[in-house]
Image (cartoon, rainbow, N blue to C red):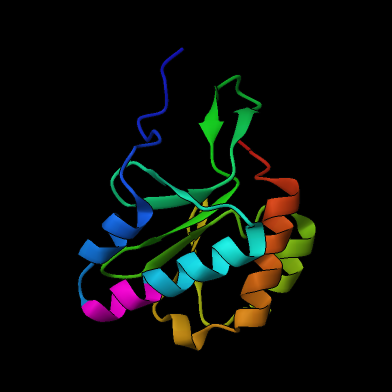
Amino acid sequence: MAENKTQKTDVPVAAFLATVQPEKRRLEGERLHAIFQDVTGDPGVMWGPTMVGYGDMHYISSAGREGDWFKVGFSPRKAKLSLYGLKDTDEQRVLLPRLGPTTEGAGCVYANRLDALDEGVLRELVALAWATGPIWRY
């Protein structure tokens, strides 16, 4: 079976975040890193060149695909912030509309600005993800 293309790297999270442009997005990435570390107690690691992940899990999808991934994470992309693991459970799906202005992709939640999000709700969503880990539905 083929491995996931995105794998853990040895790049320090702080080193990656220091390179994020524009500055506003870098500051948002640093703030997200502080929030995720505080909620999870995990230092975080880089997955691929742009994703910061917290926790480890092994999954097997309903289609039989198997791999390793992080429980919860983010990527401070130039266009939008990508937040991973925040919409996998029924409890999270009920809470998500209270987060603030977001859109959803297949496996993530997108936000234009961190300051537009409710940090308390974000922390609760991260805590729920940390407690359960992603539920893969393929």
Q: Residue furthest bottom?
A: 116
Q: Nearer the viewer, residue 124 or 93?
A: 124
Q: Residue at (37%, 35%) from the top-left corner?
A: 6
39 left or right of 81?
A: right
51 left or right of 84?
A: left
Q: Residue at (68%, 55%) from the top-left corner?
A: 129
Q: Which image quadrant is residue 11 in? A: top left
Q: Residue furthest right?
A: 91
Q: Residue at (51%, 57%) from the top-left corner?
A: 108
The image shows residue 107 at horizontal and vertical percentages of 52, 50
15 left or right of 112?
A: left
98 versus 16 height, above or below: below
Tell whether position 120 is magenta.
Answer: no
How many numbered discs, if any? Answer: 0
Quarter holding the C terminus? Answer: top right
Q: Nearer the viewer, residue 75 or 137?
A: 75
The image shows residue 103 at horizontal and vertical percentages of 49, 70
Q: Nearer the viewer, residue 86 or 72?
A: 72
Q: What type of secondary structure mainly makes up the magenta span?
A: helix
The image shows residue 7 at horizontal and vertical percentages of 39, 33
Q: Which residues are magenta?
A: 23-28
The image shows residue 9 at horizontal and vertical percentages of 35, 37
89 versus 56 height, above or below: below
Q: Residue at (64%, 38%) from the top-left corner?
A: 136
59 versus 35 height, above or below: above
129 left or right of 12?
A: right
Q: Which image quadrant is residue 89 in? A: bottom right
